[in-house]
Amino acid sequence: MDVLKSTCGSVGRVSLQMAGHAGSMALLCGRTCAHMLLGRVRLRHTTEQFVRTGADSVPIVAVMCFLVGLILAMQAAYQLEPFGATIYVADLLAVSMTREMGPMLTAIIVTGRSGSAIAAELGTMKVSEEIDALRTMGIDPIQLLVVPRTLALMVALPCLTLIADAVGIAGGLGIAVAALKLSAVQYLKETADALVMKDLLTGLGKSFFFGLIIAQVGSYQGLRVSGGAEGVGRATTTSVVSSIFLIILADLAFTALFYSTL
């Protein structure tokens, strides 16, 4: 009986903590969106963040997605070759990259690269009392720090996803030409026939919200840091884990929605 009470108490405490975090994050997201809708955006800071989170992420996103394209093409060819249907590698790779793998991989890479940086930057500012100093000077930290990072990621993620889709399909093209003895023209024609506009729009729509999730989780974890350098480390780790979890959860929700409506 004592074990049951202890278990129920632990579950209750965790549930209340999660509900509290969800409410605080919703409030932060609401304030951020309000600033955007009212046009309270610092364009110079937003551009700087776009370069840091978007343009500087292009090499790693391109390399990783190219390699994943190679892997997916080889795995698909292994299954399809016994049936003489290797041409359909193009269909499988194109749809999977644009709908799922491109947005998901890009979001996870950017979470590790930029989401953790946001949490660490804001957390360091919090423990060094720079956030309190901004409030003392009458400057809203959300407008100055959170809005530019959020807007930059919401724009950068769809752009990076387009690049991820292209290089992933290019990786499949390399396998098709080198190992499957297909011509580049055949592969690209099959890819064009397989893709429809809703496949591309589905992936880009997901990536837009993935950018919002990454920026908001990183900012929330950074702004609530306490305990010095150790707290900054905990917040950085928590932001990455939480962002990846929420990205996968959001992807599941969007996939179920698009599957039932499109």
Image: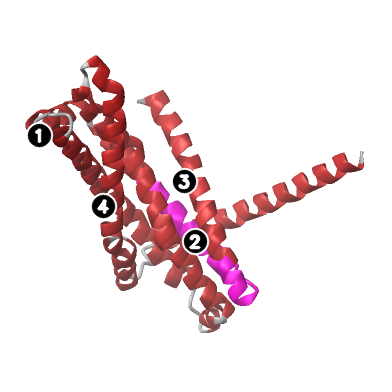
Q: Mark 4 belongs to which amino acid?
A: Ala
Of the image marks 3 and 1, the number of the one nearer the N terminus? 1
- The reply to whether dot 1 and dot 2 touch (C-beta < 8 Å) is no
Q: Secondary structure at mark 2?
A: helix
Specify the quadrant of the image occupied by residue 147.
Answer: bottom left
Asked whether disc 2 touches disc 3, contact meaning CB atoms under 8 Å apart, the reply is: no
Q: CA–CA distance between discs 3 and 1? A: 34 Å
Q: Is residue 229 above or below residue 24?
A: below
Earlier in the chain: of badge 2 and badge 3, it is 2
Q: Is 120 one of the magenta-colored residues?
A: no
Residue carrying label 3: 247
Q: Which residue is mark 2?
A: 218
Q: Amino acid at mark 1?
A: Ala
Using the image, tell me which numbered label, if any, was put on residue 75: none
Query: How far apart are the alpha carbons under marks 3 and 4?
Result: 20 Å
Please tell me whether mark 4 sits on a helix, a strand or a loop: helix
Asked whether disc 3 touches disc 4, contact meaning CB atoms under 8 Å apart, the reply is no
Label 2 neighbour load within 10 Å: few <14, some 14-19, many 20+:
many
